[in-house]
Image (spheres, rainbow, N blue to C red):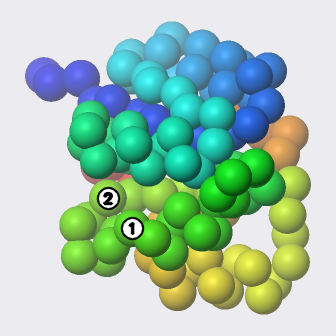
Amino acid sequence: MLLKTILVVDDSETIRQSVAGGLERAGYVVATARDGVEGLRHIQSDAPSLVILDMNMPRMNGIELLESLDVRGSGLPVVLLTTEVQPALMARAKKAGARGWMVKPVDMDQLVATVRKVLA
């Protein structure tokens, strides 16, 4: 079985480490990025299997990154992991191709289950 690589894009080092650790324990390879600009570079060079994306970040926020990707055309699944709960942002993210939306603080078991479902 080939290991799936997940890119975690979040400006919080604590969140990046926590999410990466939980996903690694679940058997995934994890790469991380501090903001949307760095995340975009990883996506273009490393072709992850899935992206977990924060909404509020410096330089390029999550919705800007999501809208800059052709996730519908590429099939790259993106799950947002954020403190935002605004219906307008959720609708905008869904329109841009987001496959899921989870609110922080995250339950790691729920996140792993979501990742497994999206990658199935």
Q: Earlier in the sequence, mark 1 or mark 2?
A: 1
Q: Amino acid at mark 1?
A: Leu
Residue 115 placement (x, y as % from top left)? 47, 43
Q: Closest to the observer: 62 or 21? A: 62
Q: Is residue 13 above or below residue 55?
A: above
Q: Which residue is mark 1?
A: 69
Q: Amino acid at mark 2?
A: Leu
Seen at 15% across and 24% down, the residue is 2
Q: Is residue 63 left or right of residue 13?
A: left
Seen at 24% across and 23% down, the residue is 3
**Tags 1 and 2 in contact by the CB under 8 Å rule?**
yes
Q: Closest to the observer: 9 or 86? A: 9
Q: Is residue 77 above or below residue 12?
A: below
Q: Closest to the observer: 66 or 45? A: 45
Seen at 23% across and 66% down, the residue is 74
Q: Quadrant of residue 12?
A: top right
Name the mark on residue 76: 2
Q: Quadrant of residue 63?
A: bottom right
